[in-house]
Image (cartoon, rainbow, N blue to C red):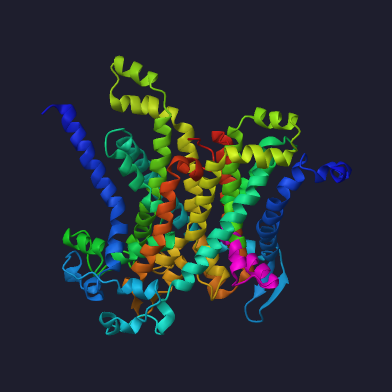
Amino acid sequence: MISRGSLPRWLTSEHPLPWLFPVTSLLVVFGLYPVLYSLWLSFYKRNPATRKEKFLPSWNWNKLISDDRVWDAVEITLTYVVIALVLQLVLGMLIALLLDTDRKGFGVMRALMTLPLVVPPAVTGMMFLLMYDSSFGVISNSLYALNLLSPSAPILGTSSTALWGVIVADVWQWTPFMVLIMLAGLRALPREPFEAASIDGASGIQSFFYLTLPMMSKIIALAILIRGIDLFRIFDYVKVMTDSGPGTATETLTAYAGTVYFKTANFPYASTVALATLIVVLVVSSVFIKVFKIKF
Amino acid sequence: MNSSRLKTILRYLVSIIIIGIFVFPIAWFALTSVKPISAVFNKDRVVVFDFEPTFDNYRVTILGGKKSDNNANSSLGMGTSGEGAYDGRGSILSSLIIAVSSTFLATSLSLLAAYALSRLSFRGSQGYMHWVLSQRFLPPIAIIVPLVFIFRDLGLRDTHLGIIIAHTLINIPIALLLLKSFFDDVPVEVDQAAMIDGATRFQCFYLVVLPMIKGGVAATAVLCFIFSWTEFLLSLFLTNSIRTVPVKITTFVTSTGSEWGYISALGTAAIIPGFIFILLVQNHLVRGLTMGAIKD
């Protein structure tokens, strides 16, 4: 007790400092410092022949703007994000509506629905690789039987279908996330407006579009934010399933940054591409949080 | 038969089919893991279940049995050679050490910070929350290049401690926001009463409020465990010899072919811990996945 009295206030538990210090120091050293380090790296031009680096702040950023592969990667990333997000959102809502009942057996079904969420994404990639295999894959063979796919054009080996192959794996894994969030939203809805609407003769579809959707707009916005950003950061499925191929048909921004890092060892440029991804994510997410007034 | 009865039957039918679709890839993977290799690769037998179940794949990957004892497999001669190449025991142990340690660190450090953010009003607390949130949205690829350098300089590259720190880092934002939402559920009057009785802030946190949110802390820990257990990108870049389970599985895919028996055995085993855990926290799952934004 004597010693406590003599401590300065910022060292006591009345002050936020001791509480925040451990987390803050970890985040600064291993989170913030690497980002600043990346930024600093991006200001250096690497000479591949001599492996020397020269301070030239605009070099990598100009290269980024004029790099066709970056713009291709942006297009592929956006295609991936939009298609997967729409599919997950719509499927998630439909399945949630279907499972939102207290009838016998639906509790078990809701629990089974969470199963894909615990599969490591790298393992998900493997599962789908196995099912897509052009000779013995169960999905491929089913599609051959239905004449929807030809054995000469394997799903992941063909430019026009490879991205879809990856999207299907993502949709399988993360639609359950949407289902859970939508279910929570549906369960929280008040009953009275729906009773009133049905007395007034509104159909189920009408009350869905005029009551359910507007009342769930906040939750839907939140789901879009979290899932959208995770989709934008996509790396595991692409790395495991196609390794950006065939050619660069599935090369997303993060995959391109990984390729520059691994294959050319051009660390300054790899940092620049990765930072570009970060900037896009932060700008989009802060605007989104402001517009939809999301509170964490 | 009246139409409401028909609707109920239809609802059951459609729900069961949809759940079936979502469970199928896991079931198929698990089935592959007990198939003899001849049944995996024979396309005419893909969907025919006329095989003797075998546990050879598990014996090699999780019990450390010798690959050469598997008569059925040795004739194919594919994949990487070497007796220990498919022994997943070291990976499972590494993954466990990393997941448990990073879960403990992330949860305990975040508890302190979350309490302060929930209870001690101070200038900049909102900004601090936003900064933490931005860490959640940070694409890991954006910090990986400098992180590799920093880890090399600190001697953390390819060490358990290194990945523990990396996973703690990605879990802190989730744990912090989630725990803050649980603290926010406890009325401030509880703290005030304890402090009138002479408790210090820390005693109030540790002896009074913490026991009240035990369930929330457990749910947070489970989610942290699952995120660490399934994480791929950081483990891939930050290690060479220590292999977490998801990274290890991807090494079973080689240029000469994929060892689907071993991949599916270790992959199936990797799903089990997460599935058991997630069933324990069903009540807080939605809150956890949305970092506390949706309370359940």
| Residue B134 relative to residue A236: left or right | right
Residue A264, x across and y down, in percent: 56, 74
Q: On screen, B285 above or below A65? A: above
Q: On screen, B27 above or below B40? A: above
Residue B187: quarter of image: top right
Query: Which segment did they paint magenta?
Result: B139-164
Quadrant of the frame with the C terminus of chain A: top right
| Residue A162 relative to residue B293: left or right | left
- Please tell me which residue lies in front, B251 or A60: B251
- Please tell me which residue lies in front, A4 or B47: A4
Q: Is residue B200 magenta?
A: no
Q: Residue sitting at 55 percent across and 69 percent down? A: B237
Question: Is there any visible trace of residue A288 in the rendered image?
Answer: yes
Question: Is there any visible trace of residue A253 in the rendered image?
Answer: no
Q: Is residue B150 magenta?
A: yes
- State the residue lying farthest toward the top: A200
Residue A176, x across and y down, in percent: 38, 46
Q: Residue sitting at 26 percent across and 72 percent down? A: B54
- State the residue lying farthest toward the right: A6
- State the residue lying farthest toward the left: B1
Residue A268: quarter of image: bottom right
Residue A288, x across and y down, in percent: 55, 40
- The number of numbered discs placed on residues in the rendered structure image is 0
- Please tell me which residue lies in front, A60 or B287: B287
Q: Residue sitting at 58 percent across and 40 percent down? A: A287
Residue A26: quarter of image: bottom right
- Magenta part, dominant SS: helix
Residue A284, x across and y down, in percent: 56, 45
| Residue B29 relative to residue B124: left or right | left
